[in-house]
């Protein structure tokens, strides 16, 4: 299935949930915020959000600077 992550198309095997996507992208354990189709998802809900073809995921991490 095709999923867009931060504007970039990626291909994943189904079925999977948001936690699976983050694990495959090696982001588990990092300080990140995640939105699925425009909705911010709490970390505790990652395993409950199932990904379907065409979904959009945005991942942001805090940055230092000014």
Image: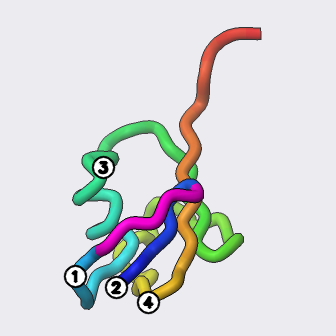
In the picture, measured across the screen, residue 15 lies left or right of residue 63, that is left
Answer above or below: position of 30 versus 28.
above
Secondary structure, mark 2, is loop
Q: State the residue at coordinates (40%, 79%).
A: 2
Whether residues under marks 2 and 4 lie with C-beta atoms below 8 angstroms apart, the answer is: yes
Range of residues picked out in magenta: 7-11
> Which is in the foreground here, disc 4 or disc 3?
4
* Image location (x, y in percent) of residue 11: 32, 73
Numbered badge on residue 52 = 4
Please, is residue 63 above or below residue 37 in the view?
A: above
Residue ID for mark 2? 1
What numbered label is drawn on residue 28?
A: 3
**Nearest-to-viewer mark from 2 and 3:** 2
Residue in the image at 56% along x and 54% along y? 6
Label 2 – label 3 distance at C-alpha: 21 Å
Q: CA distance from mark 3 to mark 1?
A: 19 Å
Q: Position of residue 66 (x, y in %)?
A: 77, 10
Q: For the residue labelled by badge 4, is the local secondary structure a helix, a strand or a loop?
A: loop
- Along the polypeptide, which appears first: circle 2 or circle 4? 2
- Spatial CA span between label 2 and label 4: 7 Å
- The answer to whether the residue labelled 2 contacts the one labelled 1, judged by CB atoms less than 8 Å apart, is yes
Mark 1 or 4, nearer chain start? 1
Circles 2 and 3: CB atoms closer than 8 Å:
no
Q: Quadrant of residue 56?
A: bottom right
**Circles 4 and 3: CB atoms closer than 8 Å:** no
């Amino acid at each position: 299935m095709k999923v867009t992550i931060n504007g970039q198309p990626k291909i994943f095997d189904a079925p999977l949930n948001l936690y699976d996507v983050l694990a495959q992208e090696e982001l588990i354990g990092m300080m990140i915020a995640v939105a699925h189709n425009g909705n911010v998802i709490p970390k505790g809900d990652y395993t409950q959000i199932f990904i379907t073809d065409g979904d959009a995921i945005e991942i942001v991490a805090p940055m230092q600077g000014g």
